[in-house]
């Protein structure tokens, strides 16, 4: 592979990345400088009307951090007021396609939009192989545009850092006073599924990625201001399964690997977070499940603020 590829690399480049906040997305909670914008809130790889596939944007110390790259992430970023070439850091939670299908295209779109500085990708293995394969598939176009348009070599701008997260929260990198940590969560059969935490001077934000009830996630999220967590509604499961006739063991995967509303209340309470933001809805395309139904079980055990996430909502 030609992309720069390091294992547990320490990041040294401090490329400026001020976010132009044109077209501000709706804010539903007062927030300081550090905030999270939900770009896509529907769990799973299926594409349809309504919620976009999973991705989020954390803004801290004037920088934008994209967490997960579900299909449509570039378009959702633009809708949130951030051009692809303004992104310098991407974090991936795990290698299910609904979290990284558009990783390569986002990096490419950044390059097409004027990227001249390195772009760092942090995530679990085999994210390096996925990125290398994507760049290889675009080799013809990259070569043509380098020669014809004078663009820099995209393959040399992409720096992939495959992270081996532990079962206890571990700092991965820090920049501009923002510490970024990860922990391994429980999302079988995937062995390398991570949650990410951002600690800025004014606020702490945790993103669960995909996980069933995980004590490791609770440890990472302990005392956080905001926990963005995946959620599954058992009542909608049968209808969801009927829409996926080619996946006979999907029910078992969902029950083994995701967090029910009842479990999520316990997670948020045990972690002691201030605000719980629901995202990665499973099912994410069932209008029969109202906001009140999403929060009903959670509120039985969690007394903090509960936000039912929507695409382009900022918390
Ligand atoms: Zn997912
Ligand atoms: Zn997953």
Image (spheres, rainbow, N blue to C red):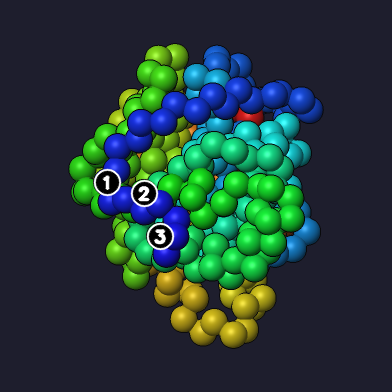
Q: Residues within 10 Å of mark 3 (few under 14, many from 20)?
A: many
Q: Establish whether ligand 2 lies closer than 8 Å to the Cβ of label 2.
A: no
The location of residue 219, given as percent across then percent down, is 26, 38
Query: Regarding mark 2 in the picture, which secondary structure is present there?
Result: strand
Check the picture and name the quadrant holding the N terminus. Answer: bottom left
Q: Are marks 1 and 3 in contact (CB under 8 Å)?
A: no
Q: Which mark is residue 128?
A: 3
Residue 118 lies, with reference to residue 7, above or below; the image says: above
In which image quadrant can residue 233 be found?
bottom right
Mark-to-mark CA distance, 2 and 1: 6 Å
Asked if the residue at tag 3 contacts the one at tag 2, i.e. Cβ–Cβ closer than 8 Å, the answer is no
The answer to whether marks 2 and 1 mark residues whose Cβ atoms lie closer than 8 Å is: yes
Viewer-side residue, 134 vs 152: 152
Measuring 29% from the left and 37% from the top, which residue is drawn there? 10
Give the structural element (helix, strand or loop) at label 3: helix
Residue 296 vs residue 123, the one in the foreground? 123
Residue 57, position in %: x, y? 57, 37
Relative image position of residue 88 (x, y in whole percent)? 53, 37
Secondary element type, mark 1:
loop
260 and 65: which is toward the camera: 65
**What residue did someone put label 1 on?**
8
Q: Residues within 10 Å of mark 1 (few under 14, many from 20)?
A: some
Residue 262 visible in this rendered orientation of the protein: no
Query: Which residue is labeled 2 in the image?
Result: 161
Mark 1 vs mark 3, CA separation in Å: 12 Å
């Amino acid at each position: 592979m030609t992309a720069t590829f390091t294992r547990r690399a320490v990041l040294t480049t401090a490329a400026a990345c001020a976010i132009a906040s044109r077209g501000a997305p709706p804010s539903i909670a007062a927030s300081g400088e550090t905030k999270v914008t939900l770009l896509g809130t529907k769990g799973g790889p299926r594409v349809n009307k309504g919620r976009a596939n999973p991705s989020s944007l954390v803004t801290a110390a004037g920088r934008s951090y994209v967490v997960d790259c579900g299909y449509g992430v570039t378009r959702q970023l633009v809708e949130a007021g951030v051009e692809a070439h303004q992104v310098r850091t991407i974090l991936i939670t795990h290698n299910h396609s609904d979290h990284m299908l558009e990783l390569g295209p986002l990096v490419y779109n950044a390059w097409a939009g004027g990227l001249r500085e390195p772009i760092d990708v942090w995530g679990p293995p085999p994210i390096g192989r996925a990125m290398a394969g994507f760049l290889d598939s675009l080799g013809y176009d990259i070569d043509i545009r380098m020669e014809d348009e004078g663009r820099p070599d995209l393959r040399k701008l992409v720096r992939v850092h495959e992270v081996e997260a532990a079962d206890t929260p571990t700092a991965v990198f820090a920049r501009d006073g923002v510490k970024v940590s990860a922990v391994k969560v429980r999302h079988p059969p995937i062995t390398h599924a991570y949650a990410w935490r951002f600690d800025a001077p004014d606020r702490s934000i945790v993103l669960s990625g995909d996980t069933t009830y995980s004590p490791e996630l609770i440890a990472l999220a302990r005392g956080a201001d905001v926990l963005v967590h995946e959620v599954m509604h058992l009542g909608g499961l049968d209808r969801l399964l009927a829409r996926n006739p080619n996946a006979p063991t999907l029910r078992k995967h969902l029950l083994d690997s995701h967090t029910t509303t009842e479990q999520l209340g316990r997670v948020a309470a045990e972690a002691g977070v201030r605000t719980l933001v629901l995202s990665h809805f499973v099912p994410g395309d069932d209008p029969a499940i109202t906001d009140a139904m999403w929060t009903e079980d959670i509120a039985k055990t969690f007394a903090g603020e509960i936000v039912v996430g929507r695409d382009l909502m900022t918390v």
